Image: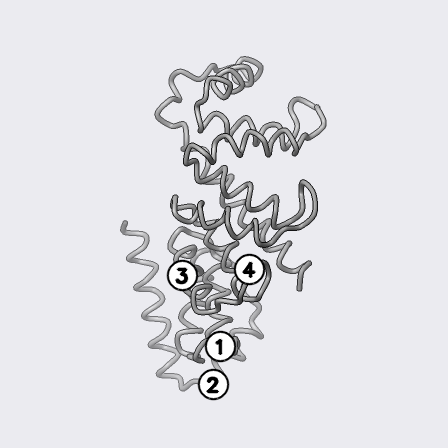
Amino acid sequence: MTKWLAMLALVAELGLVDGASGVLASDRASVPSTYGDAMRWYRKSAEKGDPAAQFYWGLILERGIQGARPNPVAAQAWYRKAAKQGNGLAAFKLGQMAHLGLVGPVDAADARRWYEQAVGRGVAAAAYNLALLLESDAGGPAMPKRALALYARAARGGVAMAALNRGRMLAQHPGVPRNFEAAIMWVVIAEGLGAEVDPAVKKAFASQLSAADIADASVRANAWLAARGAK
C-alpha cells in the first residue's frame, strides 16, 4: 500500500508542474529570455523575498540546474520561505517531500499539515494527495468521507486519478456508503479527464447496475464534464 500511495503521489506532481507555469504570468515580460539570465533572475528575485520566485528557485534546485546535482535540502528551505508567505504550490511541495521522504524520513502527519495549507490555497494536486492519506490512518485518523470530498475537489481541478479514486471509494471503501451508479459516473469522468481505466474495473462496477442506471450515470458524467469545460 505504501509503495502504491507513493507512486500515485508523483502523479499529482505532474499536475502541479503543468499548472505551475502560470504562477508568474503577470511578470513574464520582465523575465529574461536566456536560460542563464533567467536562472539568475529567479535567484535574485527569490533572495529579495518574492514568494513565486522562491517556489520556482526551489523547484530548480530540487531538479538540478544545467547538469548540477539536485539539492532537495536547499529546495526545501526555499519552499518553506515561499509557503510562509502563502504560496500554495510551495506548501504542496513541502507536503510531497514529507509524504515521500525526499528529505529525511517519511512523515505523513507533516505531509497532512502542508497539504491542508495548499488545499486552502486552491492547489488541486494537494487535495488529491491529502485524500490519499485520509483514506487510511497514515499520519492521523482515517477520514474517508473527507477523502471522498477532496477527490471531488481535485477532480474539478483536473486531476483525473482523483475522479477514478472517488469512483473506487464509492464502490468499495467500507467507510462510505456504496453507490455503484455514482461510482460509474466518476469512472466516466476520470476517462473524460484523461485517465486510463482498466476495463475490468468498469465492468465490475457496471455488473451491479441495470442498463438504464449505467446510461443515466454516463449522462450525468458527461454533464459534469461539460459544465467543467464551460467554466
Element under disc 1 = helix
Across and down, in percent, residue 89 comes to 47, 39
Residue at 47%, 18% in the rendered image: 45
- Residues at badges 4 and 2 in contact (C-beta under 8 Å)? no
Mark 1 in CB contact with mark 3 (< 8 angstroms) = no
Q: Which residue is mark 3?
A: 152
Position in image of residue 101 (x %, y %): 67, 47
- Point out the tag, 4 or 2, that comes first from the N-terminus: 4
Note whether 102 is above or below 210 in the view shown.
above
Q: Amino acid at mark 2?
A: Gln
Residue type at mark 4? Leu
Residue 133's mark?
4
Image side of residue 1 versus residue 229, left or right:
right
- Looking at marks 1 and 3 on the same chain, the residue that comes earlier in the sequence is marked by 3
Q: Quadrant of residue 86?
A: top left
| Alpha carbons under labels 1 and 2: distance apart | 10 Å
Mark 1 or mark 2: which is in front? 1
User: What kind of element bears circle 2?
Assistant: loop
| Measured Cα–Cα span from mark 3 to mark 4 | 15 Å
**Secondary structure of residue under mark 3:** helix
Disc 4 is placed on an element classified as helix
In the rendered image, which residue does mark 1 sit on?
A: 171
- Mark 1 in CB contact with mark 2 (< 8 angstroms): yes
* Residue 159 horizontal side relative to residue 5, left or right: left
Residue 211: x percent and y percent? 39, 84
Q: Disc 1 marks which amino acid?
A: Ala
Between 197 and 151, the residue placed more toward the observer is: 151
Determine the residue positioned at 46% across, 63% down: 147
Q: Which mark is residue 208?
A: 2
Q: Residue 229 location, x and y as percent? A: 32, 52
